[in-house]
Amino acid sequence: MKIITAIDSFKECITSAEANKAMASGLREVYADAEILEIAMSDGGEGWLEAFESAISNYTSFQTSSVSTDTVDPLMRPVKARYITVNDTAIIETARIIGLSLLNKEERNPLKATSYGVGLVIADALQKGYQHIIIGLGGSATSDAGQGMIQALNEKGCLPCKARITIASDVMNPLCGEHGAAYTFARQKGATEEAIPILEERALRFAEASASRCHHDYANLPGAGAAGGLGYALLQYFNSSIRSGAEILLETIDFEHIIKGADCIITGEGQSDAQTLMGKLPYTLMRHALKADVPTCLVAGRIKDKDKLLAAGFYQVECINLPNISIEYALKKDVALRNIMRTAHKLRISPV
């Protein structure tokens, strides 16, 4: 029997690698002789760097190098940031530089948070001669439409730039409007209701000035609203394209080859619902598995719209938590890991 675990991180709880290890441990208690492959996954947000590094080292012949550079966090405090390189490509994770998880709840304020630090890290990679940058967007504390990043790149003499940028993100929102960066995502970054229209106006003004400067306007492109508008700045000012972070990882490791002969794929995320079917990581994996006629089990900390998830193609959908468990208790790392191991015993690995 061959089983593949490819579970995303559970935000503010456990990493992808931790989730997969717990699932594999639980499966081995039931299927002692099974071949179990653990694949760390990320859509471009938190854990992107580790997932990419793990994928390359475990499933390709390429060698990665690690680079450390000076930068600043969302509140302009000096920090060190790490990115990895493969040949002429640099891989960067914005969540490690300006991530919401870097701030405590009292510090979270997108009116003050800046993407300047991301610009410093990109500048470092450009100045070292890397011609292709893959940048994972997600989990940012910012909603500045990338203005801070562009300011840093200007100050470092890195604009204009001919390097190729690949944006890894599953967010398809535009920069502005009802479904834009401010109105959709700013609340979860700590914005008050009064701050949201201010952030929206700032983004509109920046987009207008940028359109005049660049002679094109990409504010309405899908993905422009990713990471508080960082997607917009990268699309507007660089030779950029945007792709699903999961697809980039799967392509890198030749996932189509890995799943040949598999009896089951187990994927998951913190919460699964109808939004999962709009291109999120578990859905992307499931679509690949369907093509190979491999059943996909979905596990999550919270399940909604289970009938829709099953109808879309998931073979089994299981919540790892018992009913009526408090969110605070469920988010404890040891609780989540224990519940994933317990859920492994409930999975029907191969159709009867």
Image: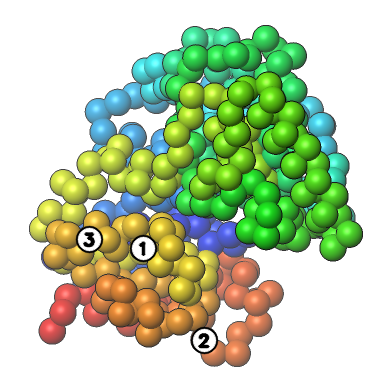
Q: Are marks 1 and 2 in contact (CB under 8 Å)?
A: no
Answer above or below: position of 232 versus 119.
Answer: below
The image quadrant where one finds the N terminus is: bottom left
| Among numbered discs 1 and 3, the one appearing first in the sequence | 1
Q: Depth check: 201 or 151 in front?
A: 201
Query: Could you give the CA–CA distance between mark 1 and mark 3, rounded to whole angstroms?
Result: 10 Å
The residue carrying mark 2 is: 322
Residue 155 spot, x, y in % from top left: 74, 14
Q: Residue at x 45, y 82 (%)?
A: 305
Which of discs 3 and 2 lies nearer the camera? The answer is 3
The residue carrying mark 1 is: 283
Q: Residues within 10 Å of mark 2 (few under 14, many from 20)?
A: few
The residue carrying mark 3 is: 289
Q: Are marks 3 and 2 in contact (CB under 8 Å)?
A: no
| Among numbered discs 1 and 2, the one appearing first in the sequence | 1
At label 1, which amino acid type do we have? Tyr
Q: Depth check: 78 or 237 in front?
A: 237
On screen, residue 342 versus residue 177, left or right, reads left
At label 2, which amino acid type do we have? Leu
Which of discs 1 and 2 lies nearer the camera? The answer is 1
- Label 3 residue SS: helix
Q: Residues within 10 Å of mark 1 (few under 14, many from 20)?
A: many
